[in-house]
Amino acid sequence: GELYSTMNVMRMELAIAILLFSIPFIQRRQWIRFLIIVFIAFLFHKSSIVFCIMYPLATIKYHKFITVAIIISAIVIASLGVTFFQFLTSTLEMYENYTEGQYFDEDRSLVAVSIGFVEKSLMLMMFYWTKYFEVPQYLNIVKNGKNNISFAYLSNMAYWMVFAFAILSFTNNIMSRVSGYFSVLTIAMIPYAIRLLKNKDLRIALFVVLSIVMASERIVIWVLRPGWNSVVPYEWGF
């Protein structure tokens, strides 16, 4: 965990780490083993159940309509505002306190959420600019005699979920944290996409811009939520 994290965030990070073990089972289309790993992660943080959507996203035949549907769904849900989240949390009987005002305080979170959205938009522009999304969708694995799902394709689909959560964050800023379950799969996409650029100066400039935007989002969060700068319930002894 990180020193500025609360115990709640640390539990979430443990759940994310556990979910990484489910990736091979998605690639091999072993859905029962995949669900077992998700259930174990669920025991650490209930929100990890949202990762279940990665299996159908990664295993169904790709069509551009899928990504369009993800973005449109995110926009519709975001437009419903707190109403949708109140319905969802009351139905599931989980996280009902997350529909309280602090997570829907637009004035308090708009700056951080906007920077986060700019970050995801810059990544999207970079992926299209470098033609990263033209990476082969499936990698043939002779060992299993089947078309296993490549990690590149899995990361691509995870990115669209990250972008969708960036949209949802404009309504409920806690969604930016939930996107962590998917963003961990997209980390490798950034350096790979940058390497596709032939101009060295352009690669450096793009890396610097992305680094500044990512750092700015974290700094803004620290300023708006200073209580996140310590680990609860532990304290330094001096």
Image (cartoon, helix red, strand yellow):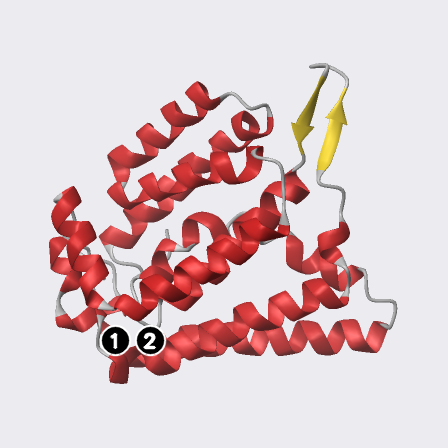
Residues at marks 1 and 2 touching, judged by CB atoms closer than 8 Å: yes
x then y, percent, for residue 196: 81, 60
**Residue 160 vertical placement versus 119 (above, below):** above
**How many numbered discs, if any?**
2
Q: Nearer the viewer, residue 122 or 67?
A: 67
**Residue 183 vertical placement versus 118 (above, below):** above
Mark 1 packing: few (<14 Cα in 10 Å), some, or many (20+)? few
Residue 3 seen in render: no
Q: Quadrant of residue 62?
A: top right
- Furthest toward the front, the residue is 65
Image quadrant in which the C terminus is located: bottom left
What is the spatial separation of the Cα atoms under label 1 and label 2, in whole angstroms? 5 Å
Q: What numbered label is drawn on residue 160?
A: none
x then y, percent, for residue 169: 35, 67
Q: Secondary structure at mark 1?
A: helix
- Side of 160 relative to 190 (left or right): left
Who's the residue at 88% across and 67% down the image?
Answer: 198
Residue type at tag 1: Pro
- Side of 165 relative to 64 (left or right): left
x then y, percent, for residue 206: 70, 75
Q: Secondary structure at mark 2?
A: helix
Who's the residue at 37% across and 32% down the image?
Answer: 38
Pointer 1: what residue? 226
Q: Nearer the viewer, residue 53 or 67?
A: 67
- Side of 16 relative to 235 (left or right): right
x then y, percent, for residue 74: 40, 61
Residue type at tag 2: Trp
Who's the residue at 35% across and 43% down the image?
Answer: 50
Pointer 2: what residue? 222
